[in-house]
Image (tube, rainbow, N blue to C red):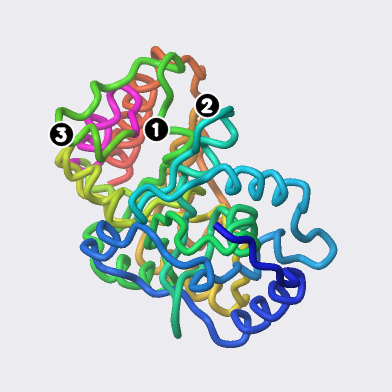
Amino acid sequence: MAEKQFHFPTYLKEEVEKVRESYYPVRVNVFTRLMKKKANPRSLHPNPDDEFCFPDIGPNYSIIAKYEAAFRMVSENNGDEFYIGSGSKSRFENDSIRDPLTVQKSRPDGYLILNGHHRWAAALKMAVPQIKIKIVNLTQVNDVRNMLARTRWDKRVTMDLDEVVFAAEGETTLEKAMPFPLNHFFKERVRKGIPTLLHTLSNKGYDIWVYSAGYYSMDYIRHYFKVWNVRLAGIVTGLGRKVKRDAETDHEIKKLIDTKYSSTLHIDRELVIRTFSGSRENEEYPLSGSPDSWIREVTDVITQIAKKDEKKQ
């Protein structure tokens, strides 16, 4: 693998300006996401909203150098896969080569990088012909509009996938892992009782919205919960991105949600909050924070709210 010398800072600056002027993310179908596993680094474009591209922060060249060193240890396996050659195999070297860059399809060409800018830079400097990628479809503004148009109820519940729904082994009691072969595709584990809770909320007339800062594809999350026979009304992913949306767009989305829903139930680890459209008033229901009793406490709050609403009618 011959190293190709070029001035990366200049290349990065030109790419950022090009992307900022005319590039935008687009959705791709499931087949493409499953089949497209590699790409030429030159077809990947930096995300202008990532700190990697900020002039006052910029790339960490010591990290890039470590990735370059890892690529130097790489050899071609039948011209297809990269693997670590003989000799020392550090955890860093293995992980840096084998983990795909997370990207989003873009117009007019190529892919926008969501995670992995330093590996991308090292691959460019080392003239790596192909690098592993994982294509995701993150939530766009039009997706939110379309989801709202298809919703069924006038009240909704919101839950954070990262903080509330998904959990790690040992953190709390978990639902059983997905059966084979689904467990090879859906690796996340959910808190014990989450599927039952979501069915309870749906039966009580709540549209279920989930949020995540992670780079999950919307269709991945939708199919994940279909295994539990749970229909999600709204899926918003990629909140960890530094996305610059204009105030008019943010106002439009908020107005659409407020128009659709009379109330929203926000379920967190230690608190349930009910807010009302067009009002600054809210109702707070503290939880103990105990993982063992969390589901029961949330269910009790839902019952309490239902009884309160019945009395008002």
Relative depth, front residue between 262 and 128: 128
Q: Secondary structure at mark 3?
A: loop
Instruction: Name which residue lies at 39% across and 60% down.
Output: 38
Foreground mark, 1 or 2, reads: 1
User: Can you see residue 207?
Assistant: no
**Residue drawn at x 37%, y 49% as measured from the top left:** 81
Horizontal arrangement in the rendering, residue 57 relative to residue 303 (left or right): right
Of marks 2 and 3, the one in the foreground:
3
In space, the residues marked 1 and 3 are separated at their CA atoms by: 20 Å
Query: Is 255 above or below relative to 33?
Result: below
How many marks are shown on the rendered structure?
3
The residue depicted at 40 percent of the width and 51 percent of the height is 216
Residue of label 2 = 270
Bounds of the magenta segment: 188-203
Q: Nearest the camera: 252 or 90?
A: 90
Q: Which residue is mark 1?
A: 166
Q: Secondary structure at mark 1?
A: loop
Q: Is residue 184 above or below residue 128?
A: above
Q: Amino acid at mark 1?
A: Phe
